[in-house]
């Protein structure tokens, strides 16, 4: 991997050698400012790959000056370079952060400056990554600024916070650079001072745009959000405004910045964001960079050299004239003239002249060097004096500004003192009001104590009433217990009578079977008569088996069936007597017996119970379904009650809410008691089936005890129906559309239905069964819950009636008399209506008893028994 990176770096450097040279010239260890032409050459490429390939080979972590100049060049590259520079540089953000933390361990010198500058660069990359609409140089129009926020106040709010963070990093670098310079000397004209100040040009460009955008965004936010919400933004902006204004002012006075950049001046006072019209007064600060001037180091010094050379040449000419004369100087040497000198004299003279000329040339060179040195020193001294003069002017202006600032601060302190006095007066007024409120609170506390005492008295009275109700319920429970014991005793007596009747029927069946066996032996002697006797025997067998069922039919049906049976028996005896007599054996006829049996079968078919329409095999499944349906109905009712209670708490208040909570709470208790009862009934039912079915299946047990099964089904239906009706009545009462009496009647009906279920379950149960005891205990719980529903309903009714009681204090004598007559008429109407309703209730109960008897095997008149379908089958067979 390292070899590939080395090859890539080498290849990039070979492809772009000029840019690599410019980068190395711009980023070096010399403590001088980066030259503009080297930085410009780096900006020509459409990316930063070559830049990073060269920079990665530089020891940035070991040389602070090298790292500082790298930060300057990279900042300029991010601002003025191609947009791909940011994409190519994001991958190095973590390395820059690590390098910033490393240089941060140095508290002075270039190390601290490098740490803050690297942090600024990472902040700039993060800002442009989050907000890609902003170019590197931050130049945008107002329309582009609105599009960057997508016209969403939340986006503008977050964008303002990010700009505050960005500007805070710029100001930190600004202040750190100024703090590192000795402002008492002319540092801006020295190479070391210019090396530190040069990167601030990019910072000034960024700060001008960030200040302008934050002002516009804050005005936009104040037009959409409350002023209190933006208090933090205003405080932060005010702090940054003061810092930026001071830094711009100090920078504009430095000689180094005057020829490179024109720094704007911020207004004296910050914008007033609470006044929307102040936006029109805002002037965007503009930084002007003049045309690039030639560097002072490269200015030609030829004029001074020419002046010195001219002066030295004139000095040489004068000295020559003094030695040889002016005529000789005007006339060139003429060695052929006859001046009386010989050749040797001329040679010596020429040699002497050459020596003097060499001495003069050497003296002239020394003079030129000294003149040049003195000129350089004088120019340096002039520059230093000018710098000191500018610095003194700056210090004078700074002192004047500080004086103005102190004067302004004094005025603000005076205003604060006045505000403090006003606040003190306001505090005195607030204390007076607080004392009055304290007295009022004391009076309210006394009244509250009286209310608490009254509430305690009412609670004691309520406890006494509750105790009386508990005693009454206990007495009612005792009565119910005695009633249940009497019912249990009656049930045991009924079962004993049933067993005796079953034994009698069994004996009768055995006698008929014995007679039938003897008749079969005699049947072998006869021919045609034997066929008739077979038919009688076949018909008599089912008749005998149906006798136990007939014993449980009503008395009228039993009487009619008995007469028909006696007649059939007489005909059968007469037929048997004819068969015994050999004389009449051939003429014996069983037609009368057959007709009699057909009539019995027809009556049984006509009076067959409706409950037998269900197949015997389906009774077991039907019991389970009905018990499950009853449990589901009770659970649904409980859920509806909980829903009604939640709605009542959300919509009702006062007495109505109290009444509804009490009634629905008692209904919930009743539903829970019914659920316990149904579960106990299921357990007892399973116990009865397991103990009584023997080797048969549960379905066969249910089919064999069909009447008991039908009783369970009927009781389960009644319990489920009662729970549903009671919830409907409670819903109407809570809504104010129903009557309290309906709810009490429904609770009584549920108590009766559960009693029916208990009675049906107890028929075949063992009296010592634990499930039976739990069922009885659950039944008492249902009765208690029913009594609770009735009591809460009556109490709620009385509270509602007390609330709606008529106020007679404002009525006149005539109005009271009229109301009295209307009440009497209403009482008479209600009494008449009550009498009619009682008659209707009696008729409904009679009809209900008749329908219930028909469902259990009685007819509507209560006097016709029904037999099983086997009689009709036996009567329909022909002898064969």
Image (tube, helix red, strand yellow):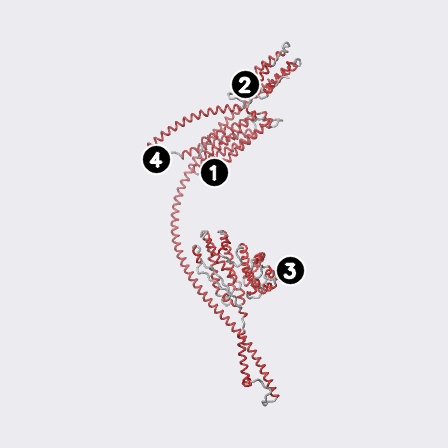
The percent position of residue 557, horizontal first and vertical second, equals 53, 19
Which one is closest to the eye, mark 4 or mark 2?
Answer: 2
Q: Position of residue 662 (x, y in %)?
A: 46, 35
Kindly identify which residue carries mark 4: 810
Q: Which mark is residue 558?
A: 2
- CB of mark 4 within 8 Å of CB of mark 3? no
Residue beneath disc 1? 647
Q: Nearer the viewer, residue 127 or 649?
A: 127
**Earlier-in-chain disc, 4 versus 3:** 3
Label 4 – label 3 distance at C-alpha? 110 Å
Of the 4 image quadrants, the one containing the C terminus is top right
| Residue 876, image x, y percentages | 60, 19
Do callouts 2 and 1 mark residues in contact (Cβ within 8 Å)?
Answer: no
Q: Nearer the viewer, residue 421 or 332?
A: 332
Measure the alpha-carbon separation of dots 3 and 2: 119 Å
On residue 7, the disc is 3
């Amino acid at each position: 991997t390292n070899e590939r990176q080395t090859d890539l770096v080498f290849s990039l450097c070979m492809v772009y050698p000029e840019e690599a040279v410019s980068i190395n010239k711009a980023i070096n260890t010399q403590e001088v400012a980066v030259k503009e032409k080297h930085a410009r050459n780096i900006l020509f490429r459409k990316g930063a790959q070559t830049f990073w390939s060269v920079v990665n080979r530089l020891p940035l972590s070991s040389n602070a000056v090298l790292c500082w100049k790298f930060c300057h060049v990279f900042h300029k590259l991010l601002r003025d370079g191609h947009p791909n520079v940011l994409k190519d540089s994001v991958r190095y953000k973590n390395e820059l952060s690590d390098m910033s933390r490393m240089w941060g361990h140095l508290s002075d010198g270039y190390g601290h400056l490098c740490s803050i500058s690297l942090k600024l660069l990472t902040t700039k990359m993060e800002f442009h990554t989050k907000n890609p609409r902003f170019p590197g140089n931050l130049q945008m129009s107002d329309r582009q600024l609105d599009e960057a926020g997508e016209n969403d106040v939340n986006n503008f709010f977050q964008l303002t916070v990010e700009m505050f963070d960005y500007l805070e990093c710029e100001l930190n670098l600004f202040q750190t650079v100024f703090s590192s310079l000795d402002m008492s000397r002319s540092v801006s004209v020295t190479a070391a001072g210019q090396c530190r100040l040069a990167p601030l040009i990019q910072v000034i460009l960024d700060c001008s745009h960030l200040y302008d955008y934050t002002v516009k965004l804050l005005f936009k936010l104040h037009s959409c959000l409350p002023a209190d919400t933006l208090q933090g933004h205003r405080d932060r902006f005010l702090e940054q405004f003061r810092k930026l204004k001071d830094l711009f002012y100090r920078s504009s006075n430095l000689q180094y910045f005057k020829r490179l950049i024109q720094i704007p001046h911020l207004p004296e006072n910050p914008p007033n964001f609470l006044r929307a019209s102040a936006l029109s007064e805002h002037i965007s600060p503009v930084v002007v960079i003049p045309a690039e001037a030639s560097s002072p180091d490269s200015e030609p010094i030829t004029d001074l050299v020419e002046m010195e050379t001219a002066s030295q040449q004139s000095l040489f000419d004068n000295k020559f004239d003094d030695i040889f004369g002016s005529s000789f100087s005007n006339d060139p040497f003429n060695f052929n003239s006859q001046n009386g000198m010989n050749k040797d004299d001329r040679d010596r003279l020429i040699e002497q002249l050459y020596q003097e000329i060499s001495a003069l040339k050497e003296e002239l060179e020394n003079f030129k060097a000294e003149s040049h040195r003195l000129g350089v020193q004088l120019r340096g001294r002039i520059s230093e004096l000018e710098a000191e003069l500018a610095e003194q002017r700056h210090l004078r202006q700074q002192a004047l500004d500080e004086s103005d600032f102190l004067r302004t601060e004094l005025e603000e302190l005076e205003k604060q003192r006045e505000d403090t006095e006003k606040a003190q007066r306001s505090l005195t007024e607030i204390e007076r009001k607080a004392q009055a409120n304290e007295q009022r609170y004391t009076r309210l506390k006394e009244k509250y104590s009286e209310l608490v005492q009254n509430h305690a008295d009412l609670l004691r009275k309520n406890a006494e009433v509750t105790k009386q109700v508990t005693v009454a319920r206990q007495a009612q429970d005792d009565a119910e217990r005695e009633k249940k014991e009497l019912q249990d005793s009656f049930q045991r007596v009924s079962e004993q009578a049933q067993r005796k009747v079953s034994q009698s029927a069994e004996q009768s069946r055995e006698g008929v079977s014995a007679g039938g066996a003897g008749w079969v032996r005699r049947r072998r002697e006869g021919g045609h008569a034997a066929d008739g006797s077979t038919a009688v025997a076949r018909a008599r067998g089912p008749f005998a088996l149906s006798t136990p069922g007939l014993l449980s039919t009503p008395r009228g049906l039993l009487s009619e069936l008995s007469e028909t049976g006696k007649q059939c028996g007489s005909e059968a005896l007469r037929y048997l007597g004819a068969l015994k007599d050999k004389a009449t054996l051939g003429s014996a006829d069983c037609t009368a017996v057959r007709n009699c049996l057909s009539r019995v079968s027809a009556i049984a078919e006509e009076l067959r119970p409706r409950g037998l329409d269900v197949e015997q095999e389906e009774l077991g499944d039907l019991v389970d379904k009905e018990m499950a349906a009853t449990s589901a109905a009770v659970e649904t009712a409980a859920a509806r009650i909980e829903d009604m209670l939640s709605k009542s708490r959300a919509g009702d208040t006062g007495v109505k809410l109290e009444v509804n909570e009490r009634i629905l709470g008692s209904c919930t208790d009743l539903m829970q008691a019914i659920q316990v009862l149904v579960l106990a009934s299921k357990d007892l039912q399973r116990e009865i089936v397991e103990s009584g079915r023997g080797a048969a299946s549960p379905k066969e047990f249910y089919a064999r005890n069909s009447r008991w099964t039908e009783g369970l089904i009927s009781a389960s239906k009644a319990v489920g129906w009662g729970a549903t009706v009671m919830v409907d009545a409670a819903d109407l009462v809570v809504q104010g559309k129903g009557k309290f009496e309906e709810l009490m009647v429904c609770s009584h009906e549920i108590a009766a239905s559960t009693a029916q279920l208990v009675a049906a379950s107890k028929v075949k149960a063992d009296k010592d069964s634990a499930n039976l005891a739990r069922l009885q205990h659950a039944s008492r719980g249902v009765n208690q819950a029913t009594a609770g529903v009735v009591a809460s309903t009556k109490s709620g009714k009385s509270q509602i009636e007390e609330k709606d009681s008529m106020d007679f204090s404002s009525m006149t004598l005539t109005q009271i008399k009229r109301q009295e007559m209307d009440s009497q008429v209403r009482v008479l109407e209600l009494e008449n209506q009550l009498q009619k309703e009682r008659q209707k209730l009696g008729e409904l109960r009679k009809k209900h008893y008749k329908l219930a008897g028909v469902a259990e095997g009685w007819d509507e008149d209560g006097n016709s028994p029904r037999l099983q379908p086997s009689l009709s089958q036996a009567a329909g067979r022909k002898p064969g």
